[in-house]
Image: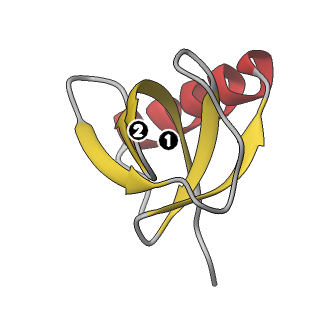
Amino acid sequence: MCLAIPARVISIEGDKAQVDFGQGVLKGVNITLVETKVGGYVLVHAGYAIQTVDEKEALETIDLWNEILSTGIE
């Protein structure tokens, strides 16, 4: 099973972007597979941005993940 997590692009330098997964989790990811801009949202899998998503969809997914994580469901 593959899992891609939405993240907001904070900065871009070449083919790398600093993204924010929320709650202070920042990571560097490769963006060669997508066209994005600072402030946009991408789906990240295995260190690569694999797709862009609109803000509404990204925030809905983040809210669902936060709900799942807060209930302790595994």
Count every numbered label the image shows and give the total: 2
Q: Amino acid at mark 1?
A: Ile
- Looking at the image, which residue is at 41% across and 46% down? 14
**Image quadrant where one finds the C terminus:** bottom left
Q: Nearer the viewer, mark 1 or mark 2?
A: 1
* Residues at circles 1 and 2 in contact by the CB criterion of under 8 Å: yes
Q: At which x and y percent is residue 48?
A: 50, 63
Residue 73, above or below 7:
below
Nearest the eye: 59 or 14: 14
Nearest the eye: 59 or 34: 34
Q: Which element is circle 2 on?
A: helix
Residue 63 shows up from this direction: yes
**Disc 1 from disc 2: Cα separation:** 5 Å
- Looking at the image, which residue is at 67% across and 29% down? 58
- Label for residue 23? none
Label 2 CA crowd tier, 10 Å (few <14, some 14–19, many 20+): few
- Label for residue 68? 1
Q: At which x and y percent is residue 35?
A: 71, 42
Q: Is residue 61 left or right of residue 68?
A: right
**Image quadrant where one finds the N terminus:** bottom right
- Looking at the image, which residue is at 40% across and 65% down? 47
Which residue is at the far front? 14
What residue would you read off at disc 2?
71
Residue 1, above or below 56:
below
Q: Is residue 26 left or right of residue 13?
A: left
Q: At which x and y percent is residue 28?
A: 29, 48
Q: Which element is circle 1 on?
A: helix
Q: Amino acid at mark 2?
A: Thr
Q: At which x and y percent is residue 37?
A: 61, 25
